[in-house]
Image (spheres, grey):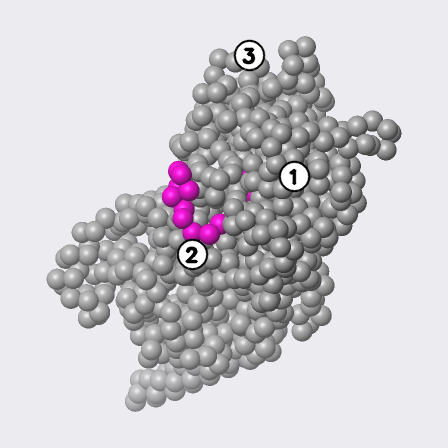
Amino acid sequence: MARKKSDGRSYRKFFVVFWLSFVGVFLFVALLFFGIVSNWFGVMPSFEELENPETNLASEIYSVDQVVLGSFYVENRSNIHFRDLPPDLINALLAIEDIRFTEHSGIDEKALLRVAWGVITGNNKGGGSTLTQQLAKNLFPRNENLSAPQLILRKFQEWITASKLERNYSKEEIMAMYLNTVPFGSQAFGIKSAALTFFGKPTAELLLEEAALMAGVVNAPTRYSPIRNPENAFRRRNLVLRKMVDYGFISRTVFDSVSQIPIDMSNYGMLDHNSGAATYFREFLRAEMREWAETHFKANGKPYDIYKDGLKIHTTINSRMQQYAEEAVREHLGKDLQPAFFKHWKGVPNAPFAFPPEEVQKQVEQILNQAMRRSERYRYLKQAGISNDSIKKSFNTPVRMRVFSWNGSIDTVMSPMDSIRYYKYYLQSSLMSVDANTGQVRAYVGGIDYRYFKYDNVTQSRRQVGSTFKPFLYTLAMQEGEYSPCYKVPNIQYSVQLFDGTFWEPKNSSKDRIGEEVTLKWALANSNNWISAYLIKRFPPESVIQMARKMGVVSPIDPVPAIALGTPEISLYEMVGAMNTFSNKGVYIKPYFITRIEDKNGNLIERFSPDQSEALDEITAYKMIQLMKGVVEFGTGVRLRSTYDLRNPIAGKTGTTQNQSDGWFMGITPQLTTGVWTGAEDRSVHFRSIYLGQGANMALPVWALYMKKIYNDPLLKISQEDFDKPMSDVLFEFDCNKYESSQSTRRGNDSNLFDDF
C-alpha cells in the first residue's frame, strides 16, 4: 500500500516537472523570440529594409540595341526578374536546395526534424535551411567568428526574417531575390552576372546542363568552381541532375544523355574593367558618370553611387557597330600595318625612333625616362619612399611579365625598361562613329587593347590633324567667298606674308599639274598645299578658326597661315563632330553618349538630348559634300573604290602630318560620319616613307573594313543612297566638265543659267 502511494507521488512529481519544464521552455522560447523581435539581441531588419534590401548593385551600361556592354561595381551583381529565369534553373535549384519551397512558409519543419535526428544519430543528411532562410542570410549577412550561442541566436533571427520575407513577397519574388544575391565565384554575384561570366550568355538562354551547374555551385562556389575545381563541378552538376530525375523534373533518358556532356568553359570570362566590349568607352563613361553622380541625389539626399546603386545607363553605342569597329582596328593593324612596321624597321639602329644620328641617343633616353616616370610601377615605388637609384635599378632588372602582342599575350622575362621600349614599337589607332542626323555616338575605339594601353585616343589625345583640317578653310571659301567646287585656280606656289615681314611658302608633295589651272575639287581631293595657301591669303587664319569653332572644335589653335596645312592638334572626338556638320546640312550636333539614366527599378532619373547649333548654311554644307566626294572618286581616298570596292556615295578626307607621324581619314556617308586616327604614342616613332605612313594607308583601311562590315549587316539598315540635296531653287552643277561648259556659255551670252556653283 505504501508502495502505491510512493508511485503516485513520483508520477505526480514527474508530471509537474514535465509540464513546468515544458512551460518554462515554451516561455523561454517565446521570450527569446519576443526579445529578438524587440531588438534586444541586435537590430532586426525593419519592414522598410525588407521592402528595399540594401545590396551593392552594379550599374549596368546598355547599348542602344539593349545589349549589356559592362558595368560599374564593387560587387558584380545585377538583378533579374523571375520571368527571365529558365524553368530548368528553377527546377535544378529546387531539387538540390529546397524541394518543399512552394509548400513551407520560410521554415521547413520536416527538414529541421531530419537535421535534429541526424544530430542525435550521427547520421546527418544535409542542412535544414530553406531558400528563404538563405536569402535572409544573404540580405543581412552574419558577422564572422560567432560563438556557438551567438550562432544559435543568429539562426533564430534568420528564421524570423525568413517568415517576414514570406509574408511580404511571393514565392516567385523570393526565388528571384535569392538568385540575385547568391555569390557564384569569379567575382560574379547573382545569376545574371554568373551566366555572363561563365557562359557569356543571358540567363534565359542557359541550357539544362548549364542551369544544373549554376544550381550546384551556389552551395560552395570555390569547392565546386568549374574553373578552379572542374572535377568537383562535374560531379556536383550530375548530382543536381540525378536529384532532378528523383523529383520528376527530367527523365532518366535525358539524364543519361546530359550527364555525359563535359563542362564547357570556352566562353568564360571574368567581367572586369579591362575586358569585354567597348573598354575605352566604358572607362570614358565612368569619368562622365562619376561627375554626373556628384550633382544628382537620391530621395534620402545622398548623391548616387555608380558602383552600388544599380543605375541603368542607356548609351548611344550600337553593340554590333562597336564590334565591327574593334574588329576593323584589329584586322588592319594586327594583320597588315603592324607587321609592315616591324619589317620596315628591322635591322635599323635605334629603331623605331627617327631622330638625326647626332641626337638619337639623347632623345631616346629622354623618351624612355619620361615613360618610366609616367608608369604605375614608378609612382608606386616613389610613394613607398624608394630612392631614384634603386628605382632605376629595379627598372633594369629582368622580371617575369606578360606583354601584349597581336597574336595573344606573351609570358616572358624582360626588364621593365625593356618592356617600355618594346611597347614603343606598337602603332595605335582610334575610331569614332556618329549617327549623322542625331549626333549619337555608335562606335568608340580608343586604342588597340585597353589591358595594356590605357590612354584613350578618342577624347584624351590631341594630335596634328594634317590635311583633314583643310575642309574648314574650304568651307569658309564656299560660304563667304561664294566659290564653287569647280572654281579654277592656277596651281603655282603662293607666298603668304607673316607678321614679321617674312614669307610662308608651303611645298607640295606631288608635282601633278604644276602651272595648270585646277579646280578646288581637284585641289582638295589631292591635298594640294599650294591651293590651300591661295585660299588662306584670301581668308585670314582668324576667320578659319572661327569657322572651326562654329563646327565644334574647341582645342587651342594658333592663328597662323600654316593651319591651312593642318598644324593644329585636335582630338578625334572634335574632328568627327565637326565633319558631321556637312552631312547634317550645316547643323553642328555635339556628339553625345547617353540617352537616359534610370534607377535600379527602372524609374527615369534623367533624359539627355544633344547640344546643336547652325554652323553654316545648307547650300555650303552640300557644296562641301560634293568637294569631299572628289577625295574618294579620284583623290587620295580612291583606294576605297579600287581596293575595297565601296561604290556608294562617300565624302572623305585623308590627312598625313609631318614625318608621317599621324594618319587620318574622315569618312562621311548620309547616315554615318566616322573618323579614324592611326599613329604611335610618340611622334618620333613613325614610318620613314610617305607611301606607308600616309593616312590613306594607316587610317583609311580601318574605315573601309568597318563600313564594309556595316553594309553587310542587314539588321543595321544602313542605307547606301546618296546625300539629300538642299531644299532650294538654286541650280547645282558639280560635274566640273559640265560646269566649265555652262560657264563658257554664260560668258558668251551673258546669261544667268547658273549661280556660281
Residue at x 35%, y 48% (from the top left corner): 267
Q: Nearer the viewer, residue 362 or 399?
A: 362
Residue at x 50%, y 27% (from the top left corner): 692
- Measure how far apart labels 3 and 1 are at the Cα level: 45 Å
Image quarter of the C terminus: bottom right
Residue 453 located left or right of residue 502? left
Give the residue at mark 1: 489
How packed mark 2 is, by other alpha carbons closer than 10 Å (few <14, some 14-19, many 20 or more), is: some
Residue at x 63%, y 69% (from the top left corner): 606
N-term mark: 1 or 2 = 1
Residue 124 located left or right of residue 392? left
Residue lying furthest top: 358
Label at residue 259: none
Above-or-below relation of 287 to 241? above
N-term mark: 2 or 3 = 3
Residue 485: give x, y in percent of width and height.
60, 48
Above-or-below relation of 684 to 243? above
Dot 3 falls on a residue whose secondary structure is loop
The stretch in magenta equals 641-655
Residue 192 located left or right of residue 481? left
- Measure how far apart labels 2 and 3 are at the Cα level: 48 Å
Give the residue at mark 2: 720
Give the residue at mark 3: 349
Q: Nearer the viewer, residue 492 or 558?
A: 492
Above-or-below relation of 284 to 619? above
